[in-house]
Image: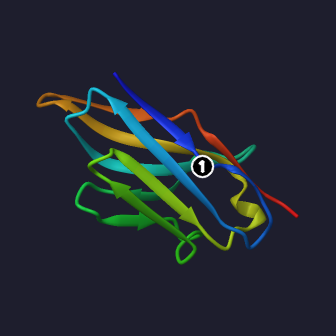
Amino acid sequence: QVQLVESGGGLVQPGGSLRLSCAASGRIFSINAMNWYRQAPGKQRELVAGIRSGGMTDYADSVKGRFTISRDNAKNTVHLQMNGLKPEDTAVYYCYADVQSAVLIRAHYWGQGTQVTVSS
């Protein structure tokens, strides 16, 4: 079993910054993709940013140029640096990991979510 623990959410004013972190622990052989999703009230969960084991990244158009995803493979962690935050970034942010626990054992895991609120 694998656990994902997120941290770093909170309340910030428009234009401010936050850094989210997610640490994976448990039975981990390797981690393929690590992504951040978000879900605002009344909306579907959406992909915010993703990073593959080799470092290739993807971003939603709405966050390009403002958010940066990074990962530390040695520590099984992923970070999301969020700058220039807008009220529309308000949501619960979820960490996701595609984990290889053994040669033939692969599964997807989610964190519990961390609230990000952008408001003056």
Residue 42 percent coordinates (x, y): 74, 43
Residue at (36%, 32%) from the top-left corner? Answer: 25
Quadrant containing the N terminus in the rendered view:
top left
Q: Is residue 97 left or right of residue 116?
A: left
Camera-nearest residue between 37 and 82: 82
Q: Secondary structure at mark 1?
A: strand
Residue at (37%, 41%) from the top-left corner? Answer: 97
Camera-nearest residue between 54 and 23: 23
What kind of residue is marked 1? Arg
Residue at the right extreme? 120
Q: Is residue 74 left or right of residue 24?
A: left
Residue 94 percent coordinates (x, y): 55, 43
Q: Which residue is mark 1?
A: 38
- Give the number of marks: 1
Residue at the bottom extreme? 65
Task: Check disc 1: other Cα within 10 Å, few if <14, some if 14-19, many if 20+.
Answer: many
Q: Is residue 91 left or right of residue 56?
A: right
Camera-nearest residue between 86 and 17: 17
Quadrant containing the C terminus in the rendered view:
bottom right
Q: Quadrant of residue 85?
A: bottom right
Q: Quadrant of residue 103?
A: top left
Residue at the top extreme? 1
Residue 56 percent coordinates (x, y): 30, 65
Residue at (57%, 69%) from the top-left corner? Answer: 63
Residue at (66%, 66%) from the top-left corner? Answer: 17
Residue 92 percent coordinates (x, y): 66, 45
Q: Is residue 118 left or right of residue 105?
A: right
Vertically, is 12 above or below 62?
above
